[in-house]
Image: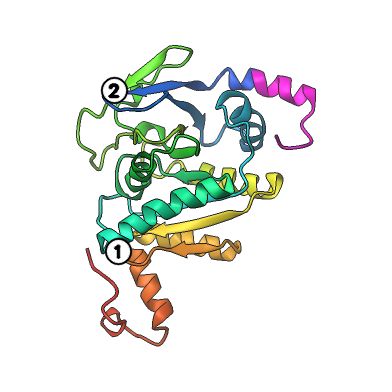
Amino acid sequence: MASGSSSKDREISQSQSDDFLNGQINFVGHTSTKPARFVVVHKDKTDVAMFADNYLPDHMELKDKPKVLLSVTGGAQDFKMLSSKLEQVFTRGIIRAAQSTDAWIVTGALDAGVMKFVGDAMRSQGVDDVPCIGIATYKKVTHYETLKSGPEVSNYSKQRPNSDQSGALNPDHTHFILVDSDADSWGQEIGFRTALEDHLIRNWGIPIVLIVVNGGPGTLDTIVQGVQKGFPIVIVEGSGRCADALAAKIKYPGAKKFEDMGGVYRKE
């Protein structure tokens, strides 16, 4: 995969990977063609470079190097696009972009908001050849304790609604990287996701495109970091909140308030 890994490094990484909680997930009642793969890493203890260079291809069956990363960020709450036409354009567009560029799609993994939107796109387009990788806080995943390590497939189902305490995994993702930590709060995966994407960009030479759908203050922070790093950014106007506010500001740079931006921004 990535160049420069010696056989000794690979032996060390193999012994370290045995310590990961990892396995497969069968989403009960869902029409998945095959189980999704998952692994639990630690926010502060997992070597991101080792994980990316050795564990992803060897244990997560991500052997084909992508030509681009489509990193989707935005609202974690359910939302509706401005129009059904926009929804169709986004659904077809992200899948066609991923297939035509041999991309990996990266999201926040849960069955809500933009993450569910991407999962729905995968399912509606009948896609099974695009890795859709969800990265989330392990202890904020509903029923995380049911995920079993080893060859036995874990049966998983959403048995209670998402809440401010936890969220279920989206069944239309192909891979999950769940980030554990000593803290029990949302957002523990952010640092690991950022470090992983940075490693793939710098060491694998893979370009990244940041796709912004809906979103709030946290999304804005992600956008600022992306701009500072020179990432191309696609803003889906009409998806609401942060995306619409930014789109409006770009269209009307002299506006002082949202009412002066042509009514583009939709408060939700």
- Residue to which mark 2 is pinned: 28
Please say if 264 is above or below 188.
below
> Looking at the image, which is closer to me, 129 or 1?
129
Q: Residue at x 32, y 27 (%)?
A: 31
In the figure, is residue 66 to the left or right of 246? right
Q: Residues within 10 Å of mark 1 (few under 14, many from 20)?
A: many
What residue sits 51% from the left and 36% below the top? 43
Residue 240 located within the stretch drawn in magenta: no
Question: In the structure shown, which secondary structural element does the residue marked by tag 2 occupy?
Answer: loop
Lateral position of residue 5 relative to residue 115, left or right: right
Rendered image: mark on residue 17: none
Q: What is the x, y in percent for residue 121?
A: 36, 45
- Marking on residue 240: 1
The three-letter code of the residue at mark 2 reads Val
Vertical comparison of 111 with 83: above or below: above
Where does the magenta region start and end? 1-14
- The answer to whether the residues at label 1 and label 2 have Cβ atoms under 8 Å apart is no
